[in-house]
Amino acid sequence: MRYLVLAAALAAVATLSLLVGPGDLGDAALRGTFLSLRAARVSGAMLAGGALGAAGALVQGLFRNPLASPSILGTTAGASFGGQVVLLAHASLASAGWLAWVAPEMVLPIGCLTGAFVSLAVLLAFVRRGADLLSLLLIGFALTSLFLALGSFLTTLAQERYELGRAVVAFTLGGLGGVDWTHVRLAIPLVAVAVVAGWLWGRPLDVLLAGEMEAASLGVDVPRTRRWTIAWVGVLTAAAVAIGGNIAFVGLVVPHALRPFFGAEHRRLIPAAVLGGATFLGACDLLARVLPTRVEAPLGVVTGLIGAPLFLLLLVRTRREGVA
């Protein structure tokens, strides 16, 4: 029943999103074009939101902390940096007469995946050496700081060309204005495979909630579970960044908010987090389009404005329940 409520909310957000946007649906000649553009954007929002929701559920299970976020592993910052590198490289090659026929949006997912996998490779190298959870947190923090600094440097370089600078800043702030069906088709297999794989690792993660020593005594291969969970989180965050850029708080807030209703069992929580993340990000994108501003508000800003207060409320509620 609770899954049906989430599905109904998702359907309502999708329907409203198809009806809202630039262009008049009363124009019979252009109605199909407008609906196709909006449908691609809605599909992109729901794919990115679902990916971030599932990634958040996996990370919170891995670290046994309901307040953990996918960004703490550094893969989000790595994916963002990879996307920025590809944007600048494409602009340089296009100005030299190379790859001018390829739209930058088509190669952006390659850069995001590469950046995320570089971050993953560093993390997994330390996992193989027996790094504990605290060490992974510190490594993720260091990687995030490094990639953010490198990304800021690239953003500065991009300001030498007006259009390139705008594209890099827009990508950094997050948004779905440039999403088309090609992005959706590229992201669907990544998100689908990673979500299913994460769901299959749900049982070991459930046992891991009791502690690593307890899980190992019950037959769970803790290092292997940790490696594969980190890998699928990296794929999910890379796919989300490739679609919508930097989008904050979805992977943090959604699983934490749904856990009281669906429990901590990952095979129940992950599907709920996918539906909840898709609904949350779709609603934020809808809000970004209807705000009375001269230009569309960046999606990352909207998710931050909504997610940060919601996170504080959830944190206060958690502390009160802990005291009680």
Image (cartoon, grey):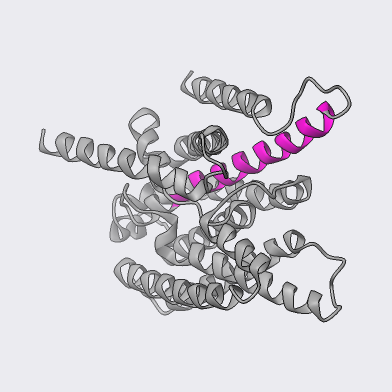
Q: Nearer the viewer, residue 273 or 308?
A: 308
Q: Residue at x 87, y 66 (%)?
A: 101
Relative placement, left or right, of 109 versus 28 is: left
Q: Give yes or no for residue 48 being in the magenta stretch.
A: yes
* Res. 252 in view: yes
| Coordinates of residue 61 in the picture (x, y in percent) | 38, 50
Image position of 19 with respect to 77: above or below? above
| Coordinates of residue 220 in the picture (x, y in percent) | 42, 57
Image position of 129 with respect to 313: above or below? below
| Coordinates of residue 299 in the picture (x, y in percent) | 52, 46
Relative placement, left or right, of 72 versus 44 is: left
Q: Dividing the picture into quarters, in which one does residue 24 lie? A: top right
Q: Nearer the viewer, residue 103 or 239?
A: 103
Q: Nearer the viewer, residue 157 or 181?
A: 157
Q: Nearer the viewer, residue 32 or 266?
A: 32
Q: Residue at x 63, y 49 (%)?
A: 191
Q: How many marks?
A: 0
Q: Which residues are magenta?
A: 31-58
| Coordinates of residue 192 in the picture (x, y in percent) | 65, 46
- Quarter of the image with the C terminus is top left
Relative placement, left or right, of 290 versus 113 is: left
| Magenta segment main secondary structure | helix
* Res. 57 in view: no
Residue furthest left as drawn? 323
Q: Residue at x 56, y 65 (%)?
A: 79
